[in-house]
Structures are given as structure tokens and as C-alpha cells.
């Protein structure tokens, strides 16, 4: 971002702040909402020094029929690349110009990863949207509370909670078309089912869900020539979740969790610009199993929590080898164990401290045509103590803390966070600033893979500076947010298309930008939301990151009816194809979605419908890969 652009952005931030300084009798806003991500404990949003994006159950219900990736891609500063492609397409997470390995995902308070993956990230394709209750997105370096990898932010997902009734059932089924743009195909190509049984009896509660999806509409790859007829790449997903727990008096609670997720998808080869990428032999199988235990004890001065769990991920990939004219098989197993013991202790009315110790163990094994990796040869352990002080006194607030990353391969490294904020008296305006650092160690794959691994890789370091403001106007009918940020990457871990190995880039790569959010609810029936993101990135960070992105949503609800119109603009992006990598510019695109619901029997039976890509736009997310055109979905939900 050049100086002129930065000055304009700062002017926008300041003038927006001045507008918010209209006198008001109270300091309540949408800030009286409760969030957890920046302290790990419940607190009012007005006492947070961050702009935290929250996707609630009502939002997820309105977006029924969309994947978690599609929902997240509507958040300011976050681009989930691949969410508009074939349903089985692998996803790229681009948060504030970062990449998959720089964002951490938590499910019910526990980190979820795949230690055998290149970037260790959790695969959002394995998560059913019907299992999700709430999502918080905390942006900026967050390693103080969330450890290695939280360089650009944290996606904190809360799964469904049991019903307070003794027995409750929710079931839904939907059928949708699945086709590319300018193609008339009205046969069902994407079918989804959801069943949920839950309840509470005395001190006990329970929940069990089963979700399935079957999709078989079009090929991942774009036909290389007009005469080519590519085969459709099918996808099948199954998710099973069980949660149970109990409360003992007012102070103690315990929750147990178990999940089993399976994903099968056909995929196509990487586009090389000289021949077809379509391939009928490529197939991927993923099985992931997770268990967790979460006891909590509340006392007079605070709370003590243990979030402990384990994940086992098994991946098998069959891929056509054009050199040997045979199918190669790759097998990977990743295992993760995590235990995070942390506590909140209130020192006085204006100050409390959060402290903890997090232990993580990760290992992997692989069996491929290029060599094998054994669990005992590819593993590491992390044990990190951390502490954060949270103060709020007469309008001034401060969230500050540090963490000592202790890694079995890389030793000890400090990260820190300093986040002051201030409520301007007699207004709804809150101004914020932060300086935070993050520390990212290479993955086991990047270190030890027989083909592309590099055992000499050094950890990557990030530093983020933020300046922001948040306010409400017109008796809380309007909410405004604005954030300027600058992130620096030192020793970025990148992949070379020339040497086919991972390496540390020399020098510092920078990401600068701005995020602006707007919410307006003039009446109980109508609401309007919009956000805009500007990114200016150094060349090494530009791939598939749009410079400009705009999201909007107009929603209406009255009686049994509800509907919404969503629109999105994604600016042109840079991509690479072939080897060692030819740069290409992808055109900007805009898409619109229309959704509606009607309660046939209030509280019992609901029908929902949607039209995605209403104007049947042709666009590209990744060079050589197809995207979804206009598609229709119709579904029914039963509740009792």
C-alpha cells in the first residue's frame, strides 16, 4: 500500500470515528455480545480489543445449503479459494494475505490439524455445516494464546449443543443441481442429509448427529479442447458426531466428544497449459477420528479448564503417473495429541489474568513411490506456558501477554501480544491498536518428505500491527468497524517449482491492508451487511490473493417467511501453472446467491430453497479448474 493509499485509509478510519462520536446515554452496542476468542473465556465484546467476526446459529440457518467454506469466505479479510469449484476440490485458506499453515482452526476449544499434511491444516471439507453452532474469526497474530501457526488468525468453531428438552430430533434432506455455467442440467447432482438426536435429563446431556453428502456433477478440470468430454468427479462425505456430558452442582461440568469423518473424492491433475488435466484414475480417501474431554471447574475468582483430545487422520491417494503409465499409491497417517490446561483468575474488578500450559504431540508416517517415513522418525513435541493480563478501567483497556514456545526440534522462542483499546466517553466509539508476534515451525512433511522435504528449514516469524475502530449509530441500528493492518513475514516457508523442495525465503515479505465492515438494521424485518477488504502484498504472497474483495447481504424476515440476497466481488488474482511455474492473471468476478425459507408448521416443518450464481457467471478460482454455474437447491427440515 503506497503512502497515498495509507493516508486515504487512515482518513477513512478517522472520519468514521468522528461520525461515531454522537452523544449517547450508554456505551452498549452490538458490543454487548459475548465472545471468547481473544481470552479463551466468555466476555462482553465491548471489553475486547479486537474486531472479532461472529457467525451465529441464525446466520448458519439462513445460509442453509452452503458449506462451511462458503460461509467463511463471506468474512472480511478471509478468502477460501476453491469453495465455488467442484465439491471435492481442495481448499486454500487466505486470511489477510496468508496461507493455510498460517491460520489455526479450533473445534470446541481444541486445535484440529492433520500432522501428515503439507501445511498441517484441518480440512474444512470434513466438517458438515449442520454440525456447527457458532464461528468466531480472530484476525492478527494470535500465537500468545493459540501457539505455533496462529500467524494470521484463528477460526474458532463451536459445534452444536444438546437440546434442553428430554428428547429432540432434527432431520433434513436437500437436493441440488451441480453444473458449470452455461450448461443446462437440472438433474440432482448434490444430495445432503442430516439427522440430529439430542436431549438433557437432569445433570446429563447428549447429542448425536449423522450427516452425509453425495455429489457427482462435473469434472474438477476445465476441458482442454472443445472436443473433450471430461468425466464427472464424484465426492462423498459422511460425518458422525457424539457429545455427552454432565454438570455437578454449580461449579463443575464435564463434556466428552467423539467424531468420525470420511471423505471420498475424485480429483484431476494440476493444470500444465499444454495438455488435459482431466484424469479418471485419481482418487483420494480421507478418514479422520477425533476424541476429546473437556472438564471445567468454576470458583469464586474464576475458572479452570482442561481441553484435551486426540486426532488420527488416514489418507490414501491414488494418482495417475504419466511417465510410467500406471497409478501410484500414496498412504499417509497423521496423529495429534493436545492437552491445554488453562485458568482465569480475577485479581480485582478491573483486572484478571489468563494463564496456561499447552502440550502437543504430532507424528506422521507415509508410504509412497518416492520413499517411506516412519512415525518414530518424523515427530515433534511442543510444551508452551503462556499468560495474558486483561484490564478494563474507566474506559481504558489492555490485553497483553506472552508465550514461551518450547519445541523439541527448535528449542525455545518467545511470542507476545500488546493490545490496548479505549472507549471514548459519552460515545459508542471504541478505538484499538495491537502489536503481536507469531512463530510457525515447518510441518513434518516439509521437513522429512523423501521427495520435497528439507531438514534444514528454519521456523517462520510473523509480526502484525493493527489500528482499528468500532462503533454504533442510530440507537444501535448501524454498526461500523474499520481496521488497518500490516504483517511482516521473516524467513517465509515457500515451495520451489524449480527444485521441487521447500525453502526459507530471504528477507521480509509484507502484507498490508484494510478491512471495513457495515451493518444496518432499520427494522425488525430488514437487515443489510457489507464488508470490504483491501490487500497489498509482496510478490511472494500474491498467489490467489485478491487485492480487493467485497461481500454484501440483504436479509428479510416476516412471520413464517425469510429470504436473503448475497453478493460477492473478487478482484483479479495471480496464479501459476506448469513447471517451474508460469504466471497468469485471473479475471475478477462477481457472483450472487438467493435463498429463502418458509415454515409450513411453525417450529416443526420448514422448506428451504436457494439459487446460487444467479446470473450464471463464468469465472475461475484456480487456473485450469472449473467452477459452479447457476444451481438450484430444495430442501425440507423436520423438528420435534
Image: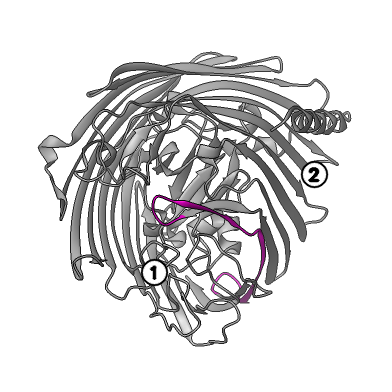
Residue at horizontal 46 percent and vertical 46 percent from the top: 157
Side of 63 relative to 427 (left or right): left
Residue at horizontal 50 percent and vertical 36 percent from the top: 153
Report the quarter where the N terminus lies: top right
Q: Is residue 508 magenta?
A: no
> From the viewer's perspective, is residue 217 above or below residue 209?
below
Residue lying farthest top?
Answer: 347
Decide if residue 163 is in sight here: no
Quarter location, residue 48 = top right
Quarter location, residue 45 = top right
For label 1, the residue is 277
Side of 277 relative to 609 (left or right): left
Circles 2 and 1, Cβ within 8 Å, touching? The answer is no
Q: Residue 449: x and y, percent? A: 22, 43
Q: How many marks?
A: 2
Residue at horizontal 41 percent and vertical 73 percent from the top: 193
Helix, strand, or loop for circle 1? Answer: loop
Q: Nearer the viewer, mark 2 or mark 1?
A: 1
Helix, strand, or loop for circle 2? Answer: strand
Q: Main secondary structure of the magenta part?
A: strand
What range is drawn magenta here? 577-605
Q: Is residue 602 magenta?
A: yes
For label 2, the residue is 478
Task: Give the Cα distance between marks 2 and 1.
Answer: 48 Å
Residue at horizontal 57 percent and vertical 39 percent from the top: 96
Amino acid at each position: 500500500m503506497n503512502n497515498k493509499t495509507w493516508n486515504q485509509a487512515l482518513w477513512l478510519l478517522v472520519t468514521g470515528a468522528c461520525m461515531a462520536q454522537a452523544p449517547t446515554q450508554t456505551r452498549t452496542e452490538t458490543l454487548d455480545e459475548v465472545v471468547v476468542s481473544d481470552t479463551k473465556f466468555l466476555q462482553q465484546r465491548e471489553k475486547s480489543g479486537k474486531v472479532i467476526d461472529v457467525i451465529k446459529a441464525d446466520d448458519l440457518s439462513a445460509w442453509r445449503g452452503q458449506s462451511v467454506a462458503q460461509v467463511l469466505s463471506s468474512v472480511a479479510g478471509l478468502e477460501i479459494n476453491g469453495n465455488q469449484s467442484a465439491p471435492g476440490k481442495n481448499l486454500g485458506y487466505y486470511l489477510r494475505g496468508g496461507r493455510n499453515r498460517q491460520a489455526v482452526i479450533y473445534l470446541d476449544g481444541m486445535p484440529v490439524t492433520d500432522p501428515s499434511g503439507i501445511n498441517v491444516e484441518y480440512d474444512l471439507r470434513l466438517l458438515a455445516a449442520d454440525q456447527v453452532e457458532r464461528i468466531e474469526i480472530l484476525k492478527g497474530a494470535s500465537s500468545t494464546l493459540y501457539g505455533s501457526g496462529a500467524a494470521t488468525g484463528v477460526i474458532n468453531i463451536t459445534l452444536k449443543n444438546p437440546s434442553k428438552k428430554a428428547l429432540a430430533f432434527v432431520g433434513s434432506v436437500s437436493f441440488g443441481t451441480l453444473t458449470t455455467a452455461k450448461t443446462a442440467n437440472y438433474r440432482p447432482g448434490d444430495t445432503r442429509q442430516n439427522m440430529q438426536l439430542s436431549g438433557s435429563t437432569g445433570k446429563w446431556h447428549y447429542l448425536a448427529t449423522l450427516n452425509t453428502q453425495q455429489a457427482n456433477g462435473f469434472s474438477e478440470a476445465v476441458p482442454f479442447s472443445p472436443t473433450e468430454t471430461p468425466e464427472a468427479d464424484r465426492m462423498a462425505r459422511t460425518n458422525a458426531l457424539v457429545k455427552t456430558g454432565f454438570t455437578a452442582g454449580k461449579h463443575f461440568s464435564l463434556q466428552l466428544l467423539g467424531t468420525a469423518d470420511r471423505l471420498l473424492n475424485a480429483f484431476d491433475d494440476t493444470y500444465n497449459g499444454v495438455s488435459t488435466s482431466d484424469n479418471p484414475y485419481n482418487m483420494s480417501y480421507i478418514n479422520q477420528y477425533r476424541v476429546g474431554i473437556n472438564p471445567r471447574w468454576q470458583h469464586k475468582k474464576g475458572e479452570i479448564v482442561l481441553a484435551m483430545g486426540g486426532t488420527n487422520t488416514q489418507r490414501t491417494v491414488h494418482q495417475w503417473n504419466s511417465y510410467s503409465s500406471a497409478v501410484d499409491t500414496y498412504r499417509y497417517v497423521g496423529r495429534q495429541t493436545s492437552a491445554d490446561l488453562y485458568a482465569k483468575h480475577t485479581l480485582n474488578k478491573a483486572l484478571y489474568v489468563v494463564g496456561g500450559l499447552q502440550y502437543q504431540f504430532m507424528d506422521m508416517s507415509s508410504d509412497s513411490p518416492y520413499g517411506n517415513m516412519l512415525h518414530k522418525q518424523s515427530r515433534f513435541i511442543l510444551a508452551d506456558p503462556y499468560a495474558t493480563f486483561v484490564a478494563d478501567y474507566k474506559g481504558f483497556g489492555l490485553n497483553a501477554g506472552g508465550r514461551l514456545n518450547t519445541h523439541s526440534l527448535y528449542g525455545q522462542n518467545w511470542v507476545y501480544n500488546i493490545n490496548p483499546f479505549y472507549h471514548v466517553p459519552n460515545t459508542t466509539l471504541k478505538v484499538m491498536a495491537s502489536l503481536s508476534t507469531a512463530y510457525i515451525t515447518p510441518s513434518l512433511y516439509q521437513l522429512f518428505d523423501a521427495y520435497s522435504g528439507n531438514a534444514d528449514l528454519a521456523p517462520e516469524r510473523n509480526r502484525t500491527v493493527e489500528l482499528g475502530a468500532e462503533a454504533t449509530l442510530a440507537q444501535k441500528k448501524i454498526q461500523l468497524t474499520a481496521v488497518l493492518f500490516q504483517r511482516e513475514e521473516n524467513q517465509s516457508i515457500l515451495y520451489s517449482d524449480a527444485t521441487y523442495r521447500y525453502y526459507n525465503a530471504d528477507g521480509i515479505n509484507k502484507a498490508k491492508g484494510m478491512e471495513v465492515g457495515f451493518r444496518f438494521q432499520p427494522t425488525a424485518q430488514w437487515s443489510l451487511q457489507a464488508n470490504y477488504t483491501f490487500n497489498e502484498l509482496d510478490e511472494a504472497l500474491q498467489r490467489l490473493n485478491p487485492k480487493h474483495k467485497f461481500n454484501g447481504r440483504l436479509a428479510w424476515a416476516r412471520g413464517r417467511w425469510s429470504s436473503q440476497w448475497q453478493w460477492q466481488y473478487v478482484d483479479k488474482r495471480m496464479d501459476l501453472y506448469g513447471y517451474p511455474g508460469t504466471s497468469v492473471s485471473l479475471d475478477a468476478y462477481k457472483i450472487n446467491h438467493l435463498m429463502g425459507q418458509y415454515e409450513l408448521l411453525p417450529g416443526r416443518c420448514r422448506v428451504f430453497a436457494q439459487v446460487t450464481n444467479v446470473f450464471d457467471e463464468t469465472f475461475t478460482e484456480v487456473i485450469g479448474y472449473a467452477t459452479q454455474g447457476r444451481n438450484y437447491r430444495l430442501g425440507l427440515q423436520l423438528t420435534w
